[in-house]
Amino acid sequence: MVQTRTSNGRYGDELFGHERSDERDRLNALTHTYDEITFARLDSLPIRSDSRCLDIGAGTGTVAVSLADRASSGRVIALDRSTAFLDPNTRENLEVMEADITTAEFPPGSFDVIHARFVLMHMPEREEVIRRVVSWLAPGGWLLLSEGIDPLSSTSPNNLYSRLFAGVWDAMHRSMGTDVNCARNYPAMLAEHGFVHIGTDVHVPHVRGGSPMAEFYRVGGSQMRESIIAAGHLDNNEFDAGMALFDDPTFIDFAMGMISVWGQRG
Ligand SMILES: C[S@@+](CC[C@H](N)C(=O)[O-])C[C@H]1O[C@@H](n2cnc3c(N)ncnc32)[C@H](O)[C@@H]1O
């Protein structure tokens, strides 16, 4: 049932455009669920107060602001192809940059810390992007990449939930080249790039009807309705019933996980 990619669409073209009235709410729900884990990971890295940091695909900027607070006498660039949700006046040492990471350029060794969360998974050329991103890190600098992973929806006792998520990942792949398993080879990739002190982690939160994570799914899933039904994952009624789970306070299941890989450039 999974189809190959037919369009050359990008993040924000068909899905998740920042001009959508509910997109900020969707991203706020994302940060509500995963920021705690990311901040704990940043706590574990030796980020200096004068570090030069880059947050790729900064979204609403919560991680960029956290980096700016850690690198209080350093500098943080919050880069996104749409800066609609990034306030350039939050912190003095935080610069907002509108750029596409697939074409952005920085001099070699420009940064001590580079972070990207739920961004590279949405672009088919991610390995080439990572190769360039690595060159922007100073020797001894730290890279933290986090992506979505979905180890558990396919085995859910709720058949609608499993089929809805098969449809969601398929629709995102066809629309913009999303690969929910892309981080699978990140540890080996970092090792090949000469990284040391490589670490890995997977965190799988739960979703309960009415929770912020359910809101994240409800808003995102509704944008994929036609694509999921046309591809035959669910019919109209099944799609509606699947989405209704996210309003049902008795529904609870594992949600999208966050897989993180980090390391120090050798
Ligand atoms: C799912 S959101 C994640 C936002 C943020 N990193 C977080 O985890 O809260 C993905 C973000 O990456 C940005 N993005 C997607 N493709 C991009 C690209 N090619 N260059 C720069 N930013 C991109 C989107 O505009 C969006 O803000």
Image: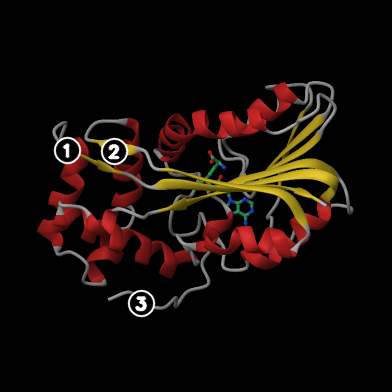
Q: Position of residue 259 (x, y in %)?
A: 50, 48
Residue depicted at x 70% and y 34%: 45
Viewer-side residue, 34 vs 230: 34
SS at mark 1?
loop
Q: Secondary structure at mark 2?
A: strand
Asked whether 6 or 160 is in front, the reply is: 160
Residue type, label 1: Phe
Contact, CB < 8 Å: mark 1 with mark 2? yes
Q: Earlier in the sequence, mark 1 or mark 3?
A: 3
Residue on which disc 3 sits: 3
Q: Amino acid at mark 2?
A: Val
Query: Splitting the image into 4 quarters, where does residue 204 fall?
Result: top left
Question: Which dot, 2 or 3, sits closer to the camera?
Answer: 2
Q: Reading the chain from its start, which is encountered first: label 1 or label 2?
A: 2
Residue 232 against residue 24 in the figure, above or below: below
Q: Which mark is residue 171?
A: none
Residue 105, visible in the rendered structure: no
- Tag of residue 207: 2
Amino acid tagged 3: Gln
Give above or below for 25 relative to 227.
Answer: above
Q: Residue at x 62, y 58 (%)?
A: 187
Q: Is ligand 1 within 8 Å of the beta carbon of the residue shown at mark 1?
A: no
The answer to the question of whether label 2 and label 3 lie on touching residues, with beta carbons closer than 8 A, is no
Marks 1/3 in contact by CB < 8 Å: the verdict is no
- Whether residue 199 sits left or right of residue 6 in the image: it is right
Q: Which residue is mark 1?
A: 251
The residue positioned 31% from the left and 53% from the top of the image is 152
Vertical arrangement, residue 110 with respect to residue 124, above or below? above
